[in-house]
Amino acid sequence: MDIQKQNNTPISVRRLIALVLLFVVVFLGFAVRLYRVQITEHAFYREQARGGATLTLPVAASRGEVLDRDLSPLVANSTAYAVVLDYNYFPAGTDEAARTCQNRVIRALTDLLTARGEEWNDTLPISESAPYAFLEGRDTSVAELKRKLRLAEYATADNCMAALCRRYLLEGYTPAEQRVLAGIQYEMEVREFSAFTPYVFSSAVSKETSYLISENTVDFAGVEIQTAARRDYVAGRTAAHMLGTVGPIYAEEYAALKEKGYALNDTLGKSGVEAAFEEVLRGTAGKRVLVKDADGVVIDAYEQEAPVPGDTVVLTLDAALQTAAQQALAEKVAEMRALPATSGGKFLNNGHDTASGSVVVLDVTNGGVLAAASWPDYDLSAYTAEYANLLKDPDKPLFNRALNGAFACGSTMKPGVAMAALNEGVITANSTFTCRYAYNRFSASGLTLHCMGRHGSIGTVTALQKSCNIFFYDTGLALGIDTMNRYSSQFGLGEKTGIEIGEASGVLAGPAHSAAVGKTWMPGDTAGAAIGQSDNLFTPIQLATYAMTLANDGVRYKTHLLHGLLGYDGRMKSDYEPQIAAQLSLSEEAIDTVRKGMVAVAASGTASRYFRNTPYTVACKTGTAQVGSNRSDHGVFIAYAPAEAPQVAMAVVLENGTSGASVAVARRVLDAYFNAAGDDVADAPFGELLP
């Protein structure tokens, strides 16, 4: 027995030690694993242990602002309180119980917002009250509504409302309540309201209203208040046509925008600068993660990536000059419209029927647009509220005449024709023609042309100074329409100038255009084209570009609005590099002769009464474009200044506003640019036109 004990004891101890070591190793393994689970990999295992799912939602970026060339704000952002429905907390489903809960929350919200004078988003293309009608200009949205409701193309607005009431279980509500609830429920559907896509119920409410919603979470299940950047058009009427607007993404637009990373509830630039620079203004959305347990209850939320604000766009526009141009236009149009229409029963060609006006001012050194004014204008800050009235206004204030209006240019065509003829050797600085008022070259065919004076023997400089038609009839015919149009195109006439926000192309008269409209081009048409009549139709920005090219001795820059981009950190990211659109090879004789003629127009010619005692020199040309009986002539004016070292070029067009009035507007705008008040100038007497 003793021998056995001696032999067995060491074995038992070794086994015990081994067992203890095994337990220690296992324990340490569990401890290490537990540490990793609870500490190192806590977030991951928290989600896994709870049987949760994660949802990644976009976080909208602040939109970049828009500044003028002096960094004064034109479009800014301010803090807004948005009412947002979050699907992850909102009553979900399409059954009766879910619809009842949804409609209760929506109605509570609309009742509160109505009581506090707040608005909510509703783009349903149906009138707000019975008898229901489809809204004008919403044909695409109406077609989409019928498609979603599976109704025939001939379905009425009443048919659509009845289908919406059935779809969203609204039969127990009053007609007014049905329209409100249907509009919001449909908007939520169109916006693809889901766990991944919150719905912006109202883009901006007051701080007080946001507090009331936040304090009553029981009544407003799934309703959140989020701070957001609100678009403020701080410039009001200044450059409204140029800046443009933003708006919601419509369902028909979404297919093309989805691939670019847009969500249906994003904001999109719709026109003007807002649309042209959408890519840099919009910024980059961030990411927000929601964690749900097995029952779908949100148990955690955190920001995975912060949004990156959009860049600030710095424009070439000078806000002060833009405002001065708009005021000069508005005051002159009001003055002209107050004039008598007839005298002794005879129609007065005095501008009493002025229809519109526009002014464009360009930086001669790079083609930057310093001002682009169009009358009538409107207040961009009140655009949404006034949109219906703006559409009905017979003066069509939403139409940008400066870029999209095309007008006969009258005698402003003559400097370009003279430049082409001199450069081609068709005439010289000393060439003369005899003006006897009537031009009988085509009298055999029944066409007699006229001048506005009897100038006798007249040379190029004096012909520009006095705007002699006879001189330019002969010059244009000697030059020929093809050569004339080749130069006109290089000057930018009848050509898009390149401005970023869109423009009309205008019309350059000639055999090609005449054939396109079913007419035959005749020699008399060439004579008419040489003085800016015929079918020539140019936009004000083209006329300003033409003046810039004359000022630059044949160099035409691409017009532009972009001066540069500022990053969200306030640092300049990029500057605009001027781009040459065309460059004419012009002789010194041509350049000097035309400049002398245009300076003579301001010093002692047809515009001299408006440019007495100016501290700056002006090279310019007046134009009167006849548009038919019982309508006043268009008043057109081009200029650049100072004549000896040009800084700015401009064009003014008054539709049915007469030439004298257009020159008066130009004087005010140039005074504003050079900060010189100048002496008061008298307008031309009624009925006295400037060639």
Image (cartoon, rainbow, N blue to C red):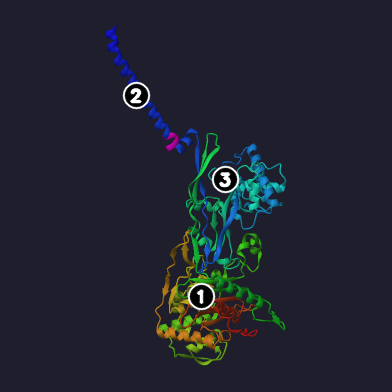
* Residue 265 in the figure: left or right of residue 30: right
Q: Which mark is residue 544?
A: 1
Give the alpha-carbon distance from disc 2 to disc 1, as whole Å: 94 Å
Q: Position of residue 645 (x, y in %)?
A: 46, 81
Give the alpha-carbon distance from disc 3 to disc 2, as whole Å: 60 Å
Bin the neighbour count of mark 2 within 10 Å (Cα to Cα): few under 14, some 14-19, many 20 and up: few
The segment highlighted magenta reads 36-40
Dots 1, 3 in contact, CB < 8 A: no
- Say which residue label 3 marks: 193
Q: Earlier in the sequence, mark 3 or mark 2?
A: 2
Q: Which mark is residue 21?
A: 2
Q: Give the SS element for disc 1.
A: helix
Residue drawn at x 48%, y 88% as measured from the top left: 461
Give the alpha-carbon distance from disc 1 to disc 3, as whole Å: 49 Å
Q: Is residue 169 above or below residue 6?
A: below
Which residue lies most toward the bottom here? 456
Q: Earlier in the sequence, mark 2 or mark 1?
A: 2
